[in-house]
Amino acid sequence: MSIASHSEQANLAQARDWLAEARSIAVLTGAGISAESGIPTFRGPGGLWNNYRPEDLATPEAFARDPKLSWEWYDWRRQRVAAAHPNPGHAALAELERRVPAFTLITQNVDGLHRAAGSRNVIELHGSLWRLRCVACAREVENREAPLREIPPRCSCGGLLRPGVVWFGEALPADAIQQAARAAARCDLFLVCGTSAVVYPAASLPERALFAGAKVVEINLEPTPFSEAAHLSLRGKSGEILPRLAQAVRHTEPLI
Ligand code: OAD
């Protein structure tokens, strides 16, 4: 066994011990957790922001200027996600929720794959591709049509429907970020998984957990700006590491 793999084993064993002891766990996920389901990430190789400019598609100004263009991009993303399935990383987090007394899953993802995998207590910080909101009357509707029949889609009041996601320059839903901050402040263990940890306020959550005294473990293919601060960084695919972590609680009876 090489020195690197020995220390990787030791790190994994340490993370599993923390997981087995934890009474309250919070997890922050990003696009990396859905990468193994075939959903592109935003940054890094093949990242969406290498090929598209957010200011052309994902701002209130871009939508006001050209709602059809913005919707064509979201419709393409909805179709990619509709054809995808949750991967073992999503499944492992759903399993943890069933076995750990207090478990909060905070995601920056808008794909809905955590719920599709069976997670229930999910805070969608950046909204959802499957929720549409009227820019005129603010009515929200659930819509799973992919492709959409009409682009841009319209509300029953005649107003334009927009994607129910958070765009650049917009505030996060206040209740979502407050609940997430509370979960980060009261957990014993915080997992940061598949996120580049550069977009705030989501990236402040692991910092908050550290400050409140939780153990913080990062799971990522690459180092991130947060890696140095984390108690442990596990390098690799979340679809491989999370199922191995979840083994730490598999002997316990599911609580739900
Ligand atoms: P990014 O694309 O910025 O980062 C994805 C992270 O996942 C990178 O650090 C990769 O190294 C890592 N990664 C990729 N594949 C992985 C795998 N199989 N296992 C583990 N890690 C893997 O995505 P986010 O951090 O989610 O915001 O981006 C944050 C926000 O920026 C998004 O929610 C979106 C974007 O602009 C909005 O649209 C508001």
Image (tube, grey):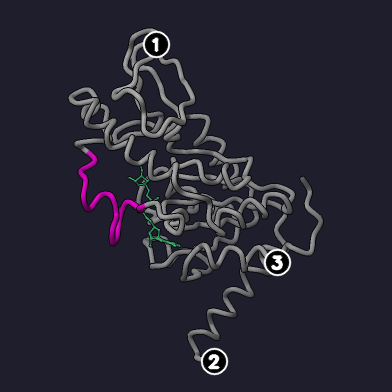
Label disc, if present, on residue 137 of the rendered structure: 1
The residue identified by callout 3 is: 248
Question: Please, is residue 224 above or below residue 49 in the view?
Answer: below
Residue 63 on image: x %, y %: 24, 27
From this viewpoint, which residue is outermost toward the bottom? 1
Quadrant for residue 202, please give it. Answer: top left
Question: Please, is residue 79 above or below residue 224 in the view?
Answer: above
Residue 123 on image: x %, y %: 54, 39
Within 8 Å of ligand 1, the CB of disc 2?
no
Which amino acid type corresponds to the residue marked 1 in the rendered image? Answer: Cys
Work out whether residue 141 or residue 17 is closer to the camera in this orientation and state it.
141
Within 8 Å of ligand 1, the CB of disc 3?
no
Label disc, if present, on residue 1 of the rendered structure: 2
User: Is 22 situated left or right of 5 in this image?
Assistant: right
Question: Please, is residue 111 above or below residue 10 in the view?
Answer: above
Residue 218 on image: x %, y %: 50, 63
Q: CA distance from mark 2 to mark 3?
A: 23 Å
